Every structure is written in C-alpha cells, then in structure tokens.
Image: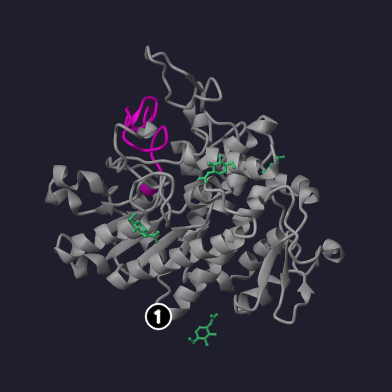
Amino acid sequence: MDSKHNLFFALVSSFFFSLILLSGQKGALVSGHSHHHRRGHLFSFRPTKLFVFGDSYSDTGNNRKSEASSWKYPYGITFPGKPSGRFSDGRVLTDFLAKFVGVKTPVAYQWRKVVGLRHLKHGMNFAHGGTGVFNTLVSDPNMTAQINSFQWLFNEKTFTPWDLQSSVALVTVAGNDYAAYIYNNGTAEGFQPFMTSVVNQIYVNLKRIRDLGVKKIAVTALEPLGCLPRSTTITSFQQCNGTENSLVSFHNLLLQQAVAKLNNETTDSPFLILDLYDSFMTVFKNKGDESGTIKFENPLKPCCVGTSAESSCGSVDEKGAKKYTICEDPESAFFWDNSHPTQQGWRAVYSALQATLHKTPVKPVHNRRRGDQYREKLAQFYWVKDHNREVHSFPISRRLRASSKETSVQFRKCEDRDRDLNAIPRRASPGVRNPTVASLRPEGTVCESHLV
Ligand SMILES: *[C@@H]1O[C@H](CO)[C@@H](O)[C@H](O)[C@H]1NC(C)=O
Ligand SMILES: *[C@@H]1O[C@H](CO)[C@@H](O)[C@H](O)[C@H]1NC(C)=O
Ligand SMILES: *[C@@H]1O[C@H](CO)[C@@H](O)[C@H](O)[C@H]1NC(C)=O
Ligand SMILES: *[C@@H]1O[C@H](CO)[C@@H](O)[C@H](O)[C@H]1NC(C)=O
C-alpha cells in the first residue's frame, strides 16, 4: 500500500466506519462538587439549557435506528442498560457536560415531537454521528443544517431569546470531515488548505450560534486520532501514530486561533475549547484519572472488537451470531470500540477537563503554558515560510500574531519523529529551539510517511 492509501485506510476506518450517531436519555452521574460551586467558575449566569451540535462524540440518539450500530447491542449495556443511540457502552461527553452545566441531558432532536414540549426544557441535541462541518460520507445533516434546525425552532418560538440567554452550547468536531476528504481522494497539497477551510467553517458555525444568542459555547479540539484503536492495532495497542497526531495538532492550532479571534471580537469571551487532545493524552499517560480513582490497564486497548477485519463491535452474521467480543469489564477500558471512549473513558476525560472548566476568564491563546505545549508539539513538525520567502522554525507565539495570509505551513519529513511522538508527550522546555531546524527541507516537501 502506498502512503496515500495507508492514510486513507487509517482515517477512513477510524472515522467513516465507526464515528457515528446516537440517542437521548436522561443523563447523569458525574461526580463530587456541587453545581453551585461549578457554575460559579465558568458561568456568570445560571444555565438552564444545553444545545448540542456535532457528531458521534456528542450524539445521544439522532441517527436512524436502522442504520447506526449505536442502536445495536452491546452499545448502551452499562447505561442505560440497552442501546440508546450513544456510541459507547454508556454515557458520552454530552451527558457529562450537561451534569456540569446543571441540566439533564437534553433530548435528541429526532425525538422532540415524541416527548412533548415540557421535555424540551433542558435544551436539545442536534448532533448526528458521522457528520462534519461539511458533508461527509453519511447523509445525515452537517453542522450548518443542524444549526438551521436550531434556528428554525427559535424562529417558531419553541425556544425564546430568554432561553438562549441562559443557555450553553456544546460543539463537537471529531474528524469526519478529514475522513471524507481522504476517502474522496483529496490531494496531499490540498490537505492543509482543507484543514484551514474546516476550521474556518467551525468559526462561522460558532459565530452563528453566538449570534443567535447562546451565552457560552464550548467547542472540542480534535482528539489524538493517532491513538484511536484503529490506528494502534498495528502495534497491538502499544503506540500512537505520531504522524496522525501531528496533523491533529495543526487543526487544533488553527482552532485556537479561531477561538481567540472570536473571543477578541466579543466582550465577554463566550467561547472555550474543550481540549480533547490534551485530556485524552493525560488519561493515557496516567492510565486513568489523576487521582487514581479510575484505572485503565492499557488505555489504548478497546473493549468491544470485531472478530474479523470485516466485522466490528455489534456485528452479527445472518443467523444472528455475534461477530465481536467484549472485554470482561467495560469499566476497565478507555475505548469502547475503534473510535469511541467507554463511559468510564469519558468520565476520565471529563475529569481531566476540569481545569479548563474551572478556569476564568477563558482566553485560550493568551495562556502561556498552552502556547508552550503547542510549541513543543509543532516545532518539530512544521516550518513556516513568511512573505519574504524565508524559512523559519516554528516560533508559535510569533505565528499566532502573524496574519495567516503571510505564512504558510509545510509538512516536513517526519519518520524520525514518529518514535518521539508515539510516546506520550513530555512537557516543553520553553525557549529551547528545535535542534533539527537546520535539516528543514525545501518548500513543497511533504511529510513522507503521512500525507498523501
Ligand atoms: C501512521 O499513519 C500514517 C498515515 O495514516 C501511515 O502512513 C503510517 O504508516 C502510520 N505509521 C505507523 C507506524 O503505523
Ligand atoms: C450542508 O448540507 C447542505 C445539504 O446537503 C448543503 O447544501 C450545504 O452546502 C452543506 N454545508 C456545508 C457548509 O457544507
Ligand atoms: C479514489 O481513487 C480510487 C483509486 O484510484 C478509486 O477506485 C476510487 O473510485 C476513487 N474514489 C473517489 C471517491 O473518487
Ligand atoms: C483584538 O482586536 C483588536 C481590535 O479589533 C486588535 O487591535 C487586536 O490586535 C486584537 N487582538 C488579538 C489578540 O487578536
């Protein structure tokens, strides 16, 4: 297989075949601290509703039962005890965030007519598994269409301006746009511009949600795709794929810039990033949560897997015989299937996100430590060519100030770095220049082992 097809395979199988959809149950059960305490940090108001947009990381039941594996046994065995349309054995990010916000898990859009008006009081979940900001490989509504549905309900007064003023939004983008790009034979040269257009579209979507009146908006950074089981199976779930993770870091850098810009354009910094990259990595490094309450023996190893290359979690043959296996205790696994965390996995991620959730005010890009982290991740992988056509290493703070029109980021040869990156990232040593700068390659060089 050439590298294009490797990338294709890894990403498409990670996303297309498994990033999917899910259902609405009353969520719950997160942990300790009182709501009052929590709200006091992130919110200057008392949230009454949660609105959710995105993909399988947040969907709680919008995909069609006939199509989604999330509606098949053994999905949902831990909570609510049967398949609920969630892509996990139990609760997903939405349920944990709802608890934090202090509301019940909002109803899935597809059930809004079934449940009756009074069940809409906690907000609504418009997320569909498998979708992206652009059209992907599923026919479900993209994020623009999801926001259209939201706007429509607002216009017809299902939700009022007052509701929106006391509401919070969760927006997840877990990578389906990239799977679709690769599936559709997108070129290597086009990949970086495509990432930019994905983030630009996220920017437009976030702004739209804000302009409709939502008070606080949390958007996820991309999780470490190279650590999803589909990418690590080749190493028996021992090592993450560093080349894929470096692409993720680039997306996340662009997202930081977009969110900083949005916050700078508004008075009360309404946008925050839920950094799924750092929180997943923290859980992997700790093999659980920081307090040691949650433990995963090998956090990269999934619980529910197909018994052959063609089958996956939930597959059955014509006679209904299982074509998958489940681990003994889903609570001991971080990943449920090839792309999605278990309930316990999400709980650990949520625990790692606490620092972000309790931080005020939220201004991601001006956080020095955050900048250092990105410098560490990216300095080794990218070089920047400025408008004078001079090659620089990657001083990220400078790049953040630079207009994106003046700089272009190129991938460079990367196989040497795989080893480093595969290990859980170490802290940056601020100010230390990447020693390999001298070996940077000429413009147009593409990281050979990862991009098409
Ligand atoms: C990492 O991912 C890239 C892109 O999908 C692939 O080409 C490469 O072979 C992978 N590396 C390993 C060690 O699996
Ligand atoms: C979202 O989907 C609609 C319907 O397929 C399509 O017309 C529109 O262009 C899509 N929006 C984006 C941003 O891709
Ligand atoms: C992508 O390329 C492969 C191999 O050349 C081809 O079989 C496939 O049909 C193409 N897919 C699309 C969506 O163009
Ligand atoms: C914020 O916006 C102001 C005016 O619009 C601009 O001068 C300033 O450079 C911006 N700051 C950042 C960090 O983007």
Quadrant in which residue 288 is drawn: top right
| In the depicted structure, whether residue 230 falls above or below residue 82 | below
According to the image, label 1 marks what residue? 267
Structure colour scheme: one colour
In the image, taking residue 176 as reference, residue 108 lies left or right, namely left
Which residues fall within the magenta stretch? 71-94
In the image, taking residue 215 as reference, residue 410 lies left or right, namely right
Q: Residue at x 21, y 65 (%)?
A: 163
The one of 278 and 446 positioned closer to us in this rendering? 446
Task: Find residue 286 and report its horizontal and vertical position in percent.
Answer: 63, 43
Query: How many residues crowd mark 1 within 10 Å: few (<14), some (14–19), many (20+)?
Result: few
Q: Residue at x 52, y 48 (%)?
A: 184
Q: Residue at x 59, y 64 (%)?
A: 253
Q: Main secondary structure of the magenta part?
A: loop
In the image, taking residue 23 as reference, residue 267 lies left or right, namely right
Quadrant in which residue 210 is drawn: bottom left
The one of 336 and 226 positioned closer to us in this rendering? 226
Q: Amino acid at mark 1?
A: Thr
Q: Mark yes or no: residue 284 visible.
A: no
Task: Find residue 353 and report its horizontal and vertical position in percent.
Answer: 50, 54
